[in-house]
Amino acid sequence: MGETSMRVTVWGENIHDRTDERVRAIYPQGMHETIAGALREALGPGATVRTATLDQPDHGLTDAVLESTDVLTWWGHAGHHLVSDEVVANVQRRVLSGMGLLVLHSGHLSRPFVRLMGTSCSLRWREADDREVVWTVNPGHPIAAGIPQAFVIPQQEMYGEYFDIPQPDELVLISSFSGGEVFRSGCCFMRGSGRIFYFSPGHEHFPVYDHPIVQRIIANGVRWAAASARTHYVTTQCFESPTGWFEHLGAER
């Protein structure tokens, strides 16, 4: 992918953002707009960043939007069950075909993520103003570029193990909480030709998405996910193949 061609869609459920006064006070334009604004600043003119929300037709994720998206970010919570089967299937198809996916915080129970993981994606949780320390455990990974060895989020919902996900292909970040729990908070997966990054910080009642290091991690994650392999032939269908079907391949070279 060229440096001037990254297309990012920031998807937000936009339920708490409209109905919860605590959330509206922190994110008056919605969490999706805060995330999108930080990405526009971090990625610069080399990227186009747009938003989509649950209440739009096809949840803002029409075939045309998904086909023109290199990386999709996803935040959801109260409306997981409202996401249509068709959109779930289309997101999965696009990821398998090479679209990157960033799943944020309570998006661990989103229907696309659960479908792509093949597990319950359940975890322990507590909303009690915990202090979270995020630890970089893979400092050479592109998502960790410019990220300190550890940083503090003063107020955050606790997420704790056991987190029922497949073993991550790469683990970049872990978190510890004031109650003593630990959590795999930055996990990378490959599915088909697509890259997936799950990043847990981001409860709606706290200004986590205004945290500059959180913003940097999300931007790094978008860059990493955008580097997904884009094959020039179809990899997501079965083909009946006669003997010798491959003999002509590369003959023009």
Image (tube, helix red, strand yellow):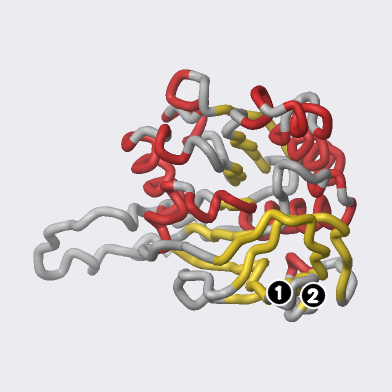
Residue at coordinates 83% horizontally, 44% vertically from top-left? 207
User: Marks 1 and 2, how far apart in space?
Assistant: 5 Å
Residue that badge 2 annotates: 135
Judge the density around disc 2: few (<14), some (14-19), many (≥20) Cα neighbours within 10 Å.
many
Q: Is residue 34 left or right of residue 18?
A: right
Percent of width and height locating residue 172: 69, 73
Judge the density around disc 1: few (<14), some (14-19), many (≥20) Cα neighbours within 10 Å.
many
Question: From the viewer's perspective, is residue 105 above or below residue 74?
Answer: below
* The quadrant where residue 33 appears: top right
User: Front-most of 22 and 147?
Assistant: 22
Percent of width and height locating residue 145: 83, 67
Residue at coordinates 74% horizontally, 56% vertically from top-left? 128
Question: Which image quadrant: the C terminus?
Answer: bottom left
Q: Amino acid at mark 2?
A: Trp
Provide the secondary structure element on which disc 2 rests.
Answer: strand
Question: From the viewer's perspective, is residue 241 above or below residue 2?
Answer: below
Q: Is residue 109 left or right of residue 13?
A: left
Question: From the viewer's perspective, is residue 169 above or below residue 194?
Answer: below
Q: Amino acid at mark 1?
A: Ile
Percent of width and height locating residue 46: 78, 41
Provide the secondary structure element on which disc 1 rests.
Answer: strand
Residue at coordinates 79% horizontally, 75% vertically from top-left? 135
* The quadrant where residue 88 appears: top left
- Residue 197 visible in the shown view: yes
Question: From the viewer's perspective, is residue 15 above or below residue 144?
Answer: above
User: Front-most of 88 and 69?
Assistant: 88
Residue that badge 1 annotates: 174
N-terminal-most mark, 1 or 2: 2
Asked whether the residues under the numbered discs 1 and 2 touch, taking CB atoms below 8 Å apart as contact, a structural biologist would say yes
Q: Residue furthest top?
A: 57
- Residue 48 visible in the shown view: no
